[in-house]
Amino acid sequence: CVRGRATATGVMGIPLCIIVAFLGLLLAGRTINVISLAGVAFAIGMTLDNSIVVLESIELERRKGAARLQAAVEAFARWGYELASTNRIAGAARVAKGLVFRHFGSKEGLFEAAVERACERVFALDDQPLPSDPFARLEEFLARRAARIQAHPAEARLIARFRCRLHSVLTPPARRIGEAYARLRHQFQQGVD
């Protein structure tokens, strides 16, 4: 979906550039000749080239951000908050440690973002209704939850590792996990996963 929007942006830039170039020629009182057409072709080439560079840069930054967050989730799940080092996280994400701090501000901010990501993935809800029979509902609910945990093991491990510890202190990550569990319980009771 993101690639489609990026392509559409690049494709829309070409006709827009042509229209603006010809309007500029018209407003300036210039005639359309070989030199002006060469200028328009050059402008189109520059616009297309620059849009490709910018879109690739945005995509690269997006991937790096996702890599930083995934590395943080895995580190916090494996070593815990105290033993997970930002040096190790930056190394796993293949970025400089300064970028981690620039993006998240602190280790605590990185941890909160990692818990948020874990909750989004593990506690994602479907709109498909659960069966009305209580036993079938429980079976289907558990099967869906098991599939989520299997699809995102590091995120599930992070939540399991910090659920009890965070519950005693009302930090933002603790509240986020508690809210996610509450929504999950409510959806189960309503019969919708």
Image: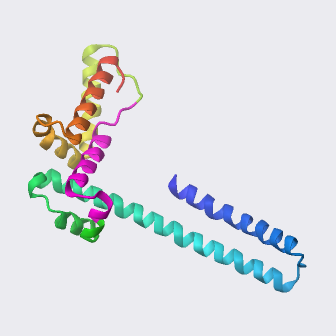
Q: Is residue 66 magenta?
A: no
Identity of the residue drawn at 88% across and 82% down: 33
Query: Does 190 sit above or below residue 49?
Result: above
Give the side of residue 25 with respect to residue 61, left or right.
Answer: right
Identity of the residue drawn at 29% across and 44% down: 116
- Indicate how the structure is coloured in the image: rainbow
Give the side of residue 123 with respect to residue 25, left or right.
Answer: left
- Per the picture, the main secondary structure of the magenta-coloured stretch is helix
Q: Whole-percent x and y of residue 176?
A: 26, 37
Identity of the residue drawn at 32% across and 41% down: 120
Residue range corresponding to the magenta coloring: 100-126
Q: Whole-percent x and y of residue 160?
A: 15, 40
Tell which of 23 and 43 is nearer to you: 23
Quarter residue 29 falls in: bottom right
Q: How many marks?
A: 0
Quarter residue 99 falls in: bottom left
The residue lying furthest to the bottom in this view is 35
The residue lying furthest to the top in this view is 133
Q: Is residue 103 magenta?
A: yes
Q: Whole-percent x and y of residue 158?
A: 18, 46
Query: Does 42 sit above or below residue 92?
Result: below
Query: Does 37 sit above or below residue 193?
Result: below
Q: Whole-percent x and y of residue 12?
A: 68, 61
Give the side of residue 105 with respect to residue 192, left or right.
Answer: left
Query: Which image quarter holds the C terminus?
Result: top left
Identity of the residue drawn at 82% across and 68% down: 23
